[in-house]
Amino acid sequence: MYGAQVLRTAKALPDRALRRAWPRRVWHGGLHGSEFTWAVAFVIPYVAVFLAFVAYPVVYGLWLGHDPELYSELLADPIYQRTVVNTVLYLVIAVNLKMFGALLLSGFFMRRRWWVKALLLVYVLPWAVPALPSFISIHWMLNGQWGFLNNLLWDVFGVDGPGWLETSRWLALGSVIASHIWKWMPFWTVILLAGRMAVPQELYEAAEVDGATGLRGFAHVTFPLLANLYLICTLLSTIFTLGDFNTVYFVSGGGPALSTHVLATLGIRDAFDVARPELGVAAVMSALPLMIPLVILLMRKLRTTEVQL
Amino acid sequence: MSAALSDGRVVKRPRYRLRRNLREGGALALGLVVLIWTLTPIYNMVLVALEPHGDVFTNDIWPATPSLESFWIVVTQGYWYLEYFWHQFGNSLYIGVLTVVLTLLIGSLASFSIGRMRLRHGWLVSNAALLTYVIPASFLAIPFYRIMQKYGLSNNLWSIIAAEVTFATPYAIFIFQQYARSIPIELDEAARIDGASPLQVYIRIYLPLMAPALVAVGTYALLLAWNEYLYQFLLLHSTQSMTVPVALAQFLNSDEAPWNYMMATAIVYAVPPVAIYYAFRRRMTAGLTMGGVKG
């Protein structure tokens, strides 16, 4: 749920042109005396929250993880090396599959059949159900001996399924990625669906008259219109996925043998299970070289371009 | 009939119909795959919860002897792990409600000041909020935990409320600023000429007109608090101050995890957000996309 409604946020940001178009005489041209006091008083609660619970922790975190030795220790640790590989795989595979699936399914949900509309209601269920119950359910479902999935495989195909989470790193990581997609693809589908709906229908009709139907219609009409939104969604999704703790923690728990940790879960493990908060902060902070460019790119994109809907 | 039109048409038509049927069939197949994919984990949750105690270790793929025993145990707190279930549920609710109220209050005040009163340097606040929005919450957890100890809020529900409000307000500020653009600024001016103070304009004009956005953001904040696990796990230790997710995860780590009870607990816990989501779904989408499309 965290970071929901990105699309709207994307468009909620102050846009220069619009800002200029706003009436200038608000509150009789600038704020005077008591009005200024009121305005400041109104914004103080948020500023206080920001300083106390964002700025201070960020600075404190930077201070905790400032020792360079922590990073050389991390780099020498095989668990950390594996974790970095996992994080990259997780980001590249999960984000792209999820976003591409969402793009395709948003087209599917444009159909005006009653059953498609009903299906959409069911399809968004993973997003509405809290993360923890679903992931615990998936964890049990993938149990090699008693899990539902292997029971089903046995009953339907007569295949003896593997222990999805217990035996191999790649199976476990794959399970985690699938769970992440299961939980978050509906959300992005809804966002992209809203994007598609806002494209005027006449555009498609005109394109169809010109012969752009099916795949060509998608390549020449739909995708160019959605490209910017798709890019912003992908960037945001990358950042949110980087910080995704619940999926890994509850589906695989980092196992088997600590082989499926990602940076977010490894940081918490180092800080609390190993009781070395500095090391945990360092593990998390080692994602900064990836995160800072993403954030800069995203903030610029969000601020300067209005997402075309 | 069609034969009368032209030769080409007569030949083309069956093929066209075949293609359409194929396409429809493909769509149905895709729909079926999506349905199974979506429902499997949820079905598993219900399946396990409906099995009588001790029957988790079976190879059934449907409940052979469905029983509501697990739900009964959860509701009556009849298992030692569930001793404080309703108390913990109350904690979750308390956190959720206060998160919603504070997020709406702080977010709407800030957006009113920045967007409507046009406070100088207000964009700095907007940017700070945007930056908060793109910091993953889990990355901030370790220093946040330490700082809560410094503030003396360890094992206190208010530490969780602080965390949820911190991560929900940025979103609230953007949505409010966005939505407020659809409300004519002349309304504020007219009220000012009539002698209303900024506080009165905020209460009498701004808040009532912002109702759809308030509902949408309130729903968002509640779902956020309901979904969150990490901060609650780190900051709440005692069974008295725990919330449902933390207690649920404790189950998971116990030696004999009673899966039926866990899944029943999970379902009871999942009902409120799902109900609220479906109740306000229309409103959420309508209120927000309206602001969005105009942006």
Image: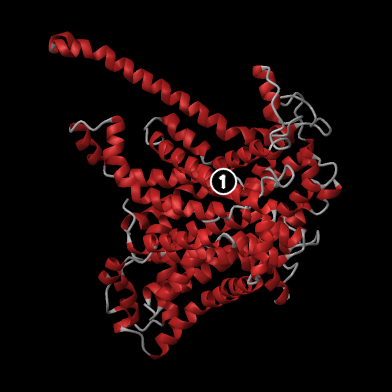
Secondary structure under the numbered disc 1 in the rendered image: helix
Q: Judge left or right: residue B80 versus residue B3.
A: right
Disc 1 sits on a residue from what chain?
Answer: A
Q: Position of residue A136 (x, y in %)?
A: 69, 43
Residue in front for this viewpoint, A170 or A236: A170
Q: Position of residue B26 (x, y in %)?
A: 42, 23
| Residue depicted at x 55% and y 49% | A88
**Quarter of the figure with residue B98:** bottom right
**Do we see residue A11 in this rendering?**
yes
**Do we see residue B182 in this rendering?**
no
Residue in front for this viewpoint, A32 or A81: A81
Q: Is residue B58 above or below residue A31?
A: above
The residue labelled by disc 1 is: A90
Q: Judge left or right: residue B227 versus residue A37.
A: right
Q: Position of residue A112 (x, y in %)?
A: 36, 32
| Residue depicted at x 32% and y 42% | A223
| Residue depicted at x 40% and y 85% | A35
Q: Amino acid at mark 1?
A: Tyr
| Residue depicted at x 19% and y 10% | B10
